[in-house]
Amino acid sequence: MGLADVDLTARIPEREYQQKLLKLQLELLEYQFQMIEEKVPIILLFEGWDAAGKGGVIRRITEQFDPRTYHVHPIGAPSPEEMRHHYLRRFWLRLPRAGEMGIFDRSWYGRVLVERVEKLCPKEAWKRAYGEINDFEKMLVNDGTLLIKFFLHITKEEQLRRFKDRESNPYKRWKITKEDWRNREKWDDYREAIEEMLAKTHKDYAHWYLISGEQKKWARIQVLEIILEHYKRIFKQGKGCIPSGCRT
């Protein structure tokens, strides 16, 4: 599995998008109540290229939810205090409680992506991180957490178009920074890091879902459908029970 497997030509018509979006949001809301009642902790993890549409997807997931039942964690650079500890510690502190949803906009995969490419940690540290991350995720899943990992993929050309749109639009200008442009210059390095991340951390207990973000509306529908599929699978197997564990 790799980025070359993503169909970047996928599109959805506007009318179909609106119909599916409302239907999926209602179904997700109904299942969300059951997940709360059965005390299933949920982690939705989003990685992807800058401007791939992660924020828009997250907004469509949560806009009909009770805001008391979920937390969105936009992950940036660690603070000086956080850097004193193991890199996973700050994520442990953000894990959802039973019956809550934690949404990570960027995640612990920064260790093998930005920290690798920007040389913010030694090579042996990010190489070691693949095993640490796999063990971390396996512990979560074995304890009954529903973990769903998404990577949003776009072309370099589409990213450039979105960057320019953000620069020219006063309502979007806050979304673009010098760091975004600097990261873009290292596209090939990031792609290499992404491919290795996917190869080494795509596991039976923690799949990666590669989503085409070339059309943002397509990406939103795909993500919602995948989440709903997981919810239905859980309750088909038995209330409160997920494939690798059952919370009591």
Image (spheres, rainbow, N blue to C red):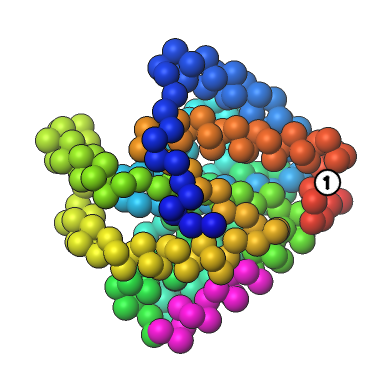
Q: Is residue 190 above or below residue 43?
A: below
Q: Is residue 95 above or below residue 175?
A: below
State the residue at coordinates (62%, 69%): 134
Instruction: Say which of 209 and 7 sits in front.
Output: 7
Residue 90's spot in the image, x, y percent?
51, 66
State the residue at coordinates (65%, 47%): 42
Assign a secondary structure to mark 1: strand
- Badge 1 crowding class, 10 Å Cα cut-off, few under 14, some 14 to 19, many 20 or more, is many
- Residue 101 picture quarter: top right
Q: Amino acid at mark 1?
A: Cys
Residue 154's spot in the image, x, y percent?
35, 45
Q: Can residue 71 be seen in this snapshot?
A: yes
**Residue position for label 1:** 241
Residue 145's spot in the image, x, y percent?
71, 53
Q: Can residue 217 be seen in this snapshot?
A: no
- Residue 35 picture quarter: top right
Instruction: Say which of 160 and 146 sits in front.
Output: 160
44 vs 14, left or right, is right
213 vs 64, left or right, is left
- Residue 13 picture quarter: top left
State the residue at coordinates (76%, 44%): 39
Q: Which residues are magenta?
A: 123-135
Q: Tell me if residue 15 is in the magenta stretch.
A: no
Residue 165's spot in the image, x, y percent?
18, 36
Q: Tell me if residue 127 is in the magenta stretch.
A: yes
42 vs 244, left or right, is left
The quadrant of the rendering that contains the N terminus is: bottom right
- Helix, strand or loop for the magenta stretch, by majority: helix
State the residue at coordinates (49%, 66%): 197
